[in-house]
Amino acid sequence: MTDVLEIQDLHVSVEGKPILRGVNLLIRRGETHALMGPNGSGKSTLGLVIMGHPNYEVTSGSIKLNGQELLEAGPDERARQGLFMAFQRPVAIPGVKLADFMRHATTNVRNPDRKEGEELIAMREFRKELRSNMDQLKMDHEFARRYVNDGFSGGEMKRAEILQMAMLQPKFAILDETDSGLDADAVRLASQSIAEIGRDKMGLLIITHHDKLLEHNPPEYTHVILGGRIVESGGVELANELYSKGYERIRQQYPDANAVNQSMEEEDASQVLGT
Amino acid sequence: MPEVESALPFTLDGFQQLLDRRGDPDWVVEARREAWAAFEAMEWPSRSSEEWMRTDLRLFHLDRFHLVVNEEPPETPLSVLNQGVDVGGRAVSWNGATHSEWVSEDLAAKGVVFCSLNRAVQEHSELVRPYLMNRAFESRYDRFAALHAAWWNSGSFLYVPRGVVVEQPLHLVSGLSGGADLGHTLVVLDEGAEATVLSESLSPEPKATGLHCGGVELLVGQGANLRFVNLQDWGTGVWHFAQQKALVDRDANLQWTVGALGAKLAKVNQHVELLGRRAECQVNGVMFTEGRQHLAYHTLQHHVSPDCHSDFLYKGALQDQSRIVWRGMIKVDPKAQKTDGYQRNDNLLLSDVARSDSIPGLEIEADDVRCTHGSTSGRVDEELIFYARCRGYTRKEAIRMIVAGFFQQVFDRIPIESVREALGESIARRVRDYE
């Protein structure tokens, strides 16, 4: 039976302010979905909410994996059940080597019932597997000895995220702007790697502004999010349209959602400016 | 032999008995008498002084403690710094009295003197005399220093002659449970000598009580190289007062690692004087407090000569209602041009009620120097916890990992594996579950 991630009528607030206003989305394992939308539309929020970020309050709706409700599960339980997110801006964990971080993570995700303090997966096999994945991503093995995301360049960060996806082999992976901040070569490498590692094997939700990432990973489904709602879904042609023509048509076609989005954008801007 | 009182009170009468029973050389007796007179003339430090305003002594009563003599330890205290290390000598004290001492024949043959300070003042009087509380330790600094100088009853002496390189670390162990430890450590490295000293203080029971009023003197001669580690892991009922001072001579190098984990209240003055040109000193401090522990470190990196380099890094983690006070000072004398001084203190608060005070300071009288300092204090970042949880870590595992990483940045500077492991394991054992 194919694994299914289903989001139904999801409403989410931060500090009492609604951000998502009824999102519906169904992803089967093996499918590639693109989630696109202008700034402030709630795309990144959706990823964080699926992973269970504590700052977001789900006011109604559900997130189900194979029919089982996930909302009460913590981020670690969701990870162990097969959810993964490649972060747009992953945080640094100084003093913790990427290899050590990954060994513990891989152990927990592969042995979902593991109790704290129980043994980690064997070092030898782990190292071998890590190295072969690093080779595929054209990463120097020395990289595993560096502290997690500490002083990484934008490209290194994104590659480290994809490396983690390769090691953890999730059922569903959310890629949050994995192409942002990368030059053309780095984007090509990232998209090829994602295609090799995840395509057809995982359910992919690719959150992106650009078409570059989608060139190697043409989505079967494209969703446009505006004002905290998915206003339109289509195939790969929708992604192409948004890339070449922007969001004008969408904004005009869905004036209510657009009005909401504009007020959210303004709020974002005022937060940035600290007003 | 008449029956002798085995627990001496810190009174004039007790002091007289101490002198009678020790039979020190005259110069030592004289120094003790002067220190005792200074002690009697002084008051305990007042909370109105900058150094003591954050550290409350009201519950400390010296008359609750006695110097116990001739007491056998229940068993040799379990030490950790020598795990997997082939040491060249060991000196052990228990409740403030020397228990055992040995040094390898190989080192003795090279002229290295390593023994209890008691033996040293008897058998190596001429070697010890120019240094003991004479150049580094300030017996009149405060009432604790005077008490220490008058009453020291155990401790160790290391002398490494000119040009001798001691490969195997020397190991000092002090055990304390219910008694008073006034141990003094004196390390003298002659020109070009090298040595590593691992010094640890511990109690057999985690809640052991006691008093430590100690002193450390490190005299690093020209071009000499000393690695000194002190791990303080007393029981949580111990009062710990210490004055620790190093003099680093021309082209010499001192690496000093401090682990501060135990004690009910600890007040430590750590003072490094960069005395000769191009002297270098690196200090690595690791502090972990819990319960109602109070830890106060006052560090001073004093640049006397030009072209010296000092680098102090202290990291602390606090849980429960514990408190850390860290007050650091870089002092640069007018002639100490081209000074490169650095000090940093980072504290991680693991509970809402823990408190850290970090007070870095600079006092610079030369005009061509580079001195930087900084401090941070904060909770474990929730975004780091979330990121790790997204990779399958439980919240507790995530916090443990982040705390371990926080200290790893100090461990990276410590070249001795047993020290890194002992500190890492002690901390991992202490980190509890947090919401």
Image (spheres, rainbow, N blue to C red):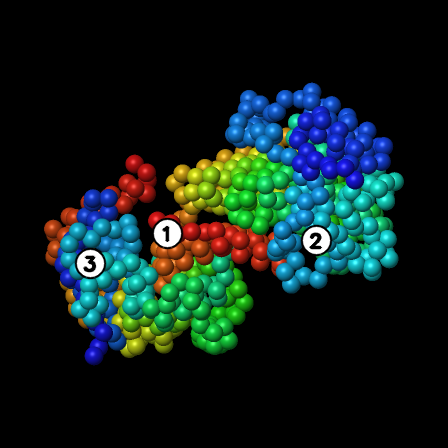
Q: B123 above or below B30?
A: below
Q: Are marks 3 and 1 in contact (CB under 8 Å)?
A: no
* Residue A113 seen by the camera: yes
Residue at image position (73%, 29%) is B15
The amino acid type of the residue labelled 3 equals Ile
- Residue A4: where, in percent of width, then height? 21, 71
Residue at image position (32%, 67%) is A80
Residue assigned mark 1: B383
Residue B3 appears left or right of A229: right
Q: Residue furthest bottom?
A: A1
Residue assigned mark 2: B171
Of circles 3 and 1, the one toward us is: 1
Same-subunit check for callouts 3 and 1: no
* Residue B300 seen by the camera: no
Q: Residues within 10 Å of mark 3 (few under 14, many from 20)?
A: many
Chain for disc number 1: B
Of circles 2 and 3, the one toward us is: 2
Residue assigned mark 3: A225
Q: Quadrant of residue A85?
A: bottom left
Q: CA distance from mark 3 to mark 1?
A: 25 Å
Q: Residues within 10 Å of mark 1 (few under 14, many from 20)?
A: some
Q: Residues within 10 Å of mark 2 (few under 14, many from 20)?
A: many
Same-subunit check for callouts 2 and 3: no
